[in-house]
Image (cartoon, grey):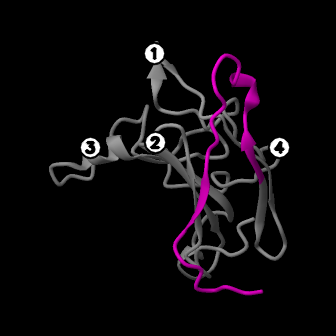
Amino acid sequence: TLPYSVVDSDMVFKVLTSRSNEYFLLENRQKKSFDSYLPSKGLAIWHINTNLAKLLSEGGGNNVNNDTSQLGVGLLQADGLRHLELNANRGDGTDLFPQTNKNNCTPTTKPSTSLYYKLNNIRQSSDISFTDIFQHADSSITFEFGMNTSAAFGRQAKTPRIESCGRNRGARD
């Protein structure tokens, strides 16, 4: 559960993958304070590739996301339309989770949690799934976090770790 929005606390979850340079950040974004002009509220799932972000930002330019096939910092847009990468808009009401009939983000959904890492030119599964994403009336967001075990045959199962980043300034009991 992400009980508070980023506005009310600086709580963000970091989900580590099997690749040391790739992870996911999860934020509860609500339409208030500095987020009051967001087109919608919900769960923002960011895919971070530190190697690419570092490589593309060297030299002082803001080139972190110049390669739209694998971004340094990319929002997994719930509608799967990739409007941000294609410069179609600067975000719309269907980018955050959940959406009608769109409350899962897994290695097999669009968008997917697949890694940017490729083997034989095929993006590899992260084995990470966020399912049953639900926005509650009190602004908290709940979801199931787990492994996609369908891809575990013939190799050791990896256990992704989830961490809380930052301190929770607005902690409530």
Tell me where residue 70 sits by quadrant: top left
The residue sitting at 59% across, 72% down in the picture is 11
**Identity, as a three-letter code, of the amino acid under mark 3:** Leu
Mark 2 or mark 3: name the one nearer the start of the chain. 3
Q: What residue is shown with label 3?
A: 56
Per the image, is 126 magenta? no
Q: Main secondary structure of the magenta part?
A: loop
Q: What residue is shown with label 1?
A: 121
Where residue 149 appears, x then y in whole percent? 75, 30
Nearest to viewer (mark 1 / mark 4) = 1
Vertical arrangement, residue 11 with respect to residue 86, above or below: below
Magenta segment, which residues? 144-173
Vertical arrangement, residue 8 with respect to residue 59, above or below: below
Check residue 85 in the rendering and tell me which mark sits there, or answer none: 2
Mark 3 or mark 1: name the one nearer the start of the chain. 3
**Identity, as a three-letter code, of the amino acid under mark 1:** Asn
